[in-house]
Image: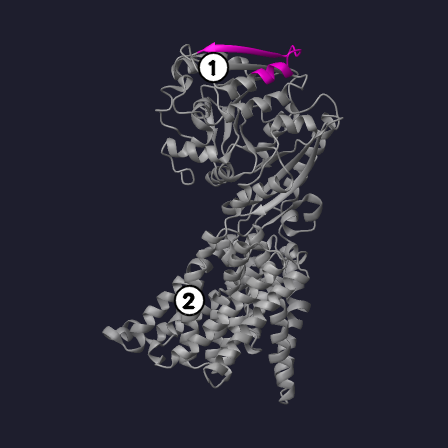
Amino acid sequence: MTKMFGGFVIGLFYYKDILNFRLLYPPMVDYMLKTFSYLGFIFYTFKLGVESNTGALLKKVDMETSIIAASGFAVSYTFSRAGLRLLNVTSTAGLEKMILLNAKTFYMVTCNHVNEVGISNSELGRLACTISLVADIVAYSGTFMLNSVIEPLDGGDYWKPTLATGTYVVMFAICRPLVIHIISYTPEGGRVKDTHFLAILLIALLLAMLGLQANQFLAVFVFGFFLPEEPLSSILHDKLDAITSSVLFPIFCAVNGLRADFYALNSKSYILEIVLIMGAFGKFLGTLVSSMIFGVHFRTALALSIIMASKGFISITRIAQYRKLGVMNREQFTLMSLHILFFTGAFLPLVRYIYKPSSQYSTIIRQGVITSSETGTLQVLACIFKEENMPGILRLLQAFQPRSAKKPIPVIALQLIPITSGGVSVPIVAPLHEIQSSAAYRSNLSRCNRTVNALVGLEHKTNGAIRPQHYISVSSYASMHNDICNVSLDNNVSLLILPFHAQWTDYNNFRGFRHPSQPIRDVNKMVLDTAPCSIGVLIDRGDQNLANLSDVYRVAIFFIGGVDDQEALAYTTIFANNPSIRLSVIRLISSTQSDENFEDNFAINSFQLRCIDNERVSFEEVIVNDGGETTSFVVNMKDEIDLAVIGRYHEPGCTPLFGLLDRWCDYPELGTLGDMLVSPEFGFSILVVQERPQRARKYANEVNVDYQDD
């Protein structure tokens, strides 16, 4: 929209030749820009068509989404027609096109909008995309039959329907099999040959030219829509995205904005704008009422209605087509362009403030970790960003192993696959058996199979005491935290395990973290801030070639106090059931501590009662008077620990960390003690536990750190 606004500004100078602007913009430049703009439109829509992974959405299409889609269109059209009668406006072909376009919803545009506001994998995002998909399929099919078949045949024109139908016959009978045959030569994970890539683009250009002759401007999108998403989506993203999204398509938007002639507007143009406003209000009201009838929450329905009433580049393309064919005059084109620009630009940002996916987690009341483990309702969710995360995750899950399989611990392994392409890609999150037929799974087949084999091996090693289930999430990093939180919420998860964003290495005299991923770190921060359950951030320093738990695995918890430490103690209570684990509970207190916390004492006493007969569990109180003494004590124990469990948040005035709070914090998401323990001086793994997201925000405020933007 901003590129189109730039075209409006240029148009103001062009039509009145202000400051001799036409000397800077001669006709030759205009022809060149129009050529580049059309190339940008072809490549951009082709890429969006390929990225339209609608398989998951088609499964969600039902009577409710169909009725909501139909209601929005019908009420918008009815309101617009009523506006014409009330204002005594004579209907013209151009005005009819404006009314119909104002009532339509386009799938590509809706997907772009939900991606833009960061809700693509939320309940609202998927609902909006499903509704727009239904509306788009019906509208496109109806428009094709009416404009390209029925009306020409009624007028005795047999060439136009023959050419339009022939375009799609060539597309599906010749071009699609040819492209599939070409990409079959590219091995999994391999690079496509330049000649193959150019051949695919040439086929798309030829179809676009044929579609132009048949008045089918979106034929190239339909062609991409029915092509396999992978590996073609990755190929187009790697080789075409930069030049198309950053250069050619912005030129297309600007050139269409340039066609607007503000001097064609007159004192009566506001009447047409009132008709358009009534249509937009009808679209909003029809979607709002129908969605609320089907039980959609008011705020969600409100945001959905704004998204459905918003327009985008497809609408701009349509009115440009109508202007070129002479259906719309300059006044109607300019007015419709301004309506699309300002209505979408003004109201779409409101969705961010109306709908917040994380708000549904704030009212969750869940059982504690200990209660869940005792009642057999304990559910663990382990996130896997990369294959390097697997050994540490598997060792930690084996540490949760109960004494027998009578009360097995269900584990969800959520494999997170980032979407590399943008556009209209719809995020997917589902169990493995529901996603095996999707392009996202096939394009990551080897990686997914290795994860499946590792999880099957884990169940065998634990004799069924750990029962893993494999989920796959395909989404952008910006919205990946929504999938993690939604899976946690839907499955009543008690423990959520997040791998640290950097990989530990101790090789070639280098000891520290390598290959840090800022996007993964941002995902972890968002999860820490919004998750509906307790979280453990795992910093794995174990052997990457060994995924099995050793015969004697030494776990220590450093208990200082507070709700996060109490939750960490609950984690270690589960560890105490594993016969391979030697557990040390070390309570750090000060010599001047006079008023002890009742909840801390209750947690310690409860733990001691549970483990009173367990010889593999030891308890020790250590007196420390500042952070320096705490650091010295941990350093002396570093060779006696395989895994340290700590709480993330501690009160600023706590004596065991006195002085450490003033030091620079490289990883505020780990807390003060966690940030100290990740230094290269310590070689053991760390599990940083957080009990409530509210503590994360409070901690960030106290250490003056922007929690979202590090």
The x, y position of residue 190, in whole percent, is 59, 47
What residue sits right under mark 1 in the picture? 588
Cα separation between marks 1 and 2: 61 Å
Task: Please indicate, yes or no, whether residue 621 appears anywhere in the rendered image.
Answer: yes
Determine which quarter of the picture holds residue 182: bottom right
Task: Please indicate, yes or no, whether residue 199 appears anywhere in the rendered image.
Answer: no
**Which structural element holds mark 2?**
helix
Q: In the image, is residue 491 above or below residue 674? A: below
The x, y position of residue 283, in whole percent, is 53, 68
Mark 1 Cα shell of 10 Å, populated few (<14), some (14-19), many (≥20) = many
**Which structural element holds mark 1?**
strand
Residue range (magenta): 605-623
The numbered dot on residue 341 is 2
The x, y position of residue 149, in whole percent, is 64, 81
Camera-side residue of 59 and 417? 59
Q: In the image, is residue 144 above or below residue 672? A: below
Q: Amino acid at mark 2?
A: Leu
Image quadrant containing the N terminus = bottom left
Residue 305 magenta-highlighted:
no
